[in-house]
Image (cartoon, grey):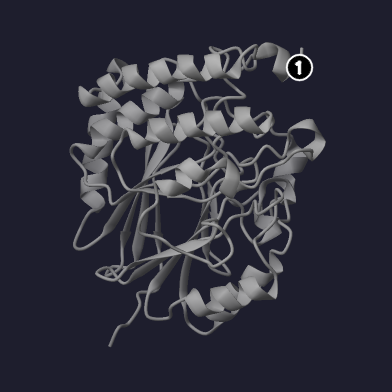
Amino acid sequence: ASKETKIDDIEETVSGIETDINALADAVAKEGTENYTATEAEDVISRIRACQTGNSLTFALVTDIHYGSTDKQYGLLDTSCPYMLDHTIKNINYVSKFVHYDFLVNLGDNTDGDLAPSQNKALDDVVNKKLGLLKIPYLFSAGNHDTNIYYNNGSNTRTPSEMYAYGYSMMTRTKSRPGTYGNDWYLDLDELGIRIISLSVNYTYRYRFSGEADLQTWLETVLDSDKINIIFTHLSMISSQNWNGTAPNRAKYPRNAVSAFVENGGTVIQLCGHSHADYSFETPWLCVFSNCTKFFQSDLSISQWEAITGNDELGIVNPERVEGEASEDCWTTVIVNPELGTIDFIRFGAGNDRHYTFDVVNDE
């Protein structure tokens, strides 16, 4: 059956989810976790605190939620578990009572993007409203599924700025690149010597950056040699680093800018989602991929993994997820210490902690 026949009335469906949001809000207010994740939460809090030395940036990271069109409970499709996102939110909320989060970062793919415009927008609003219950400053970087581009062979497609206006409205401190309607932005944390930059990979079409030479020029201006530059992109701008070797259109323009900046001694750390796995590259600059927050892992063929350069040596982790155990959940706390030149990824649930170093920026 088509997705349309499985959703008799999207407004009624969303209304049912809205009721759950109210119930989730009550659960969040009680500051509890799922019983079987309580031990995991205490352990994660301890590991985070061990990394928070000196003046550091700490944020919670989610990516590839793929909510809505994989929701069995609400009749949208016949896979996955929608309440897993609720568990994630309750767990982040609990940890945040003991660990200060500067931001909640979402690296994209809130839904599958394969429903009609009004349906996809409604479901994305649900995701953002649920995440908004955490009351943590929110940062969003659009992924390739973050329009309804996968609906009806790409017809009647909306841009992320139309589809995700609610999510973008949650970001109040960012400075947007002119003409991108909030899709590309940066944010300065002057007290830490950090600049966060986000580049949408879904600008008017999936797998497309927002410009050509104009994007390169803007990025050359925004990259700051006096700061640590943390770049959020759903996919890497180096195609051989992505699952299935996915090459975003116009990727050479931001790649040119970042490559020249790094060659001239600039510090760049890039954080990506998309591949539904944990792995990283340390050259030509540090690029770290994080596993999906959605419960079910993708069934990936060997050819798709082999498309990633050095896949046999990277130690790619595609962790097992078990419903009713801590591994059903998967999100990360990222701690950046600009003085020590360290960045730590502390995993709640499925997967492992990871530690990296980078060149400290000399401000003398």
User: Quick one: SS at disc 1?
Assistant: loop
Apparent side of residue 284 relative to residue 362 in the rendered image (left or right): right
- x then y, percent, for residue 148: 67, 37
Report which residue position mark 1 lands on: 2
Residue at point 79%, 38% (across, down): 155
Q: Is residue 341 above or below residue 278?
A: below
Q: Nearer the viewer, residue 28 or 61?
A: 28
The percent coordinates of residue 319 (x first, y second) are 52, 32
Name the foreground residue: 13 vs 94: 13
Residue displayed at 39% across by 51% down: 171
- Spot the residue most to the bottom: 364
Give residue 166's position: percent from left, percent from top: 47, 41
Q: Which amino acid lies under the numbered mark 1 shown in the image of this protein?
A: Ser
Quadrant in the rendering for residue 283: bottom right
Q: Residue placed at 60% from the left, 78% from the top?
A: 217
Where 267 sits versus 310, above or below?
Answer: below
Q: Is residue 42 left or right of residue 166?
A: left
- Where the N terminus falls, by quadrant? top right
Relative to residue 63, is residue 355 depicted above or below?
A: below
318 horizontally vs 299: left or right: left
In this view, which residue lies farthest toward the right? Answer: 153
| x 46%, y 43%: residue | 167
Can residue 284 be seen? yes
Quarter of the image that includes the C terminus: bottom left
Side (left or right) of 134 relative to 115 = left
User: Dot 1: within a 10 Å radius of its alpha carbon, few (fewer than 14), some, or many (20 or more) residues?
Assistant: few
Tell me, yes or no, if residue 66 can be seen here. no
Give the percent coordinates (x, y) of residue 6: 68, 12
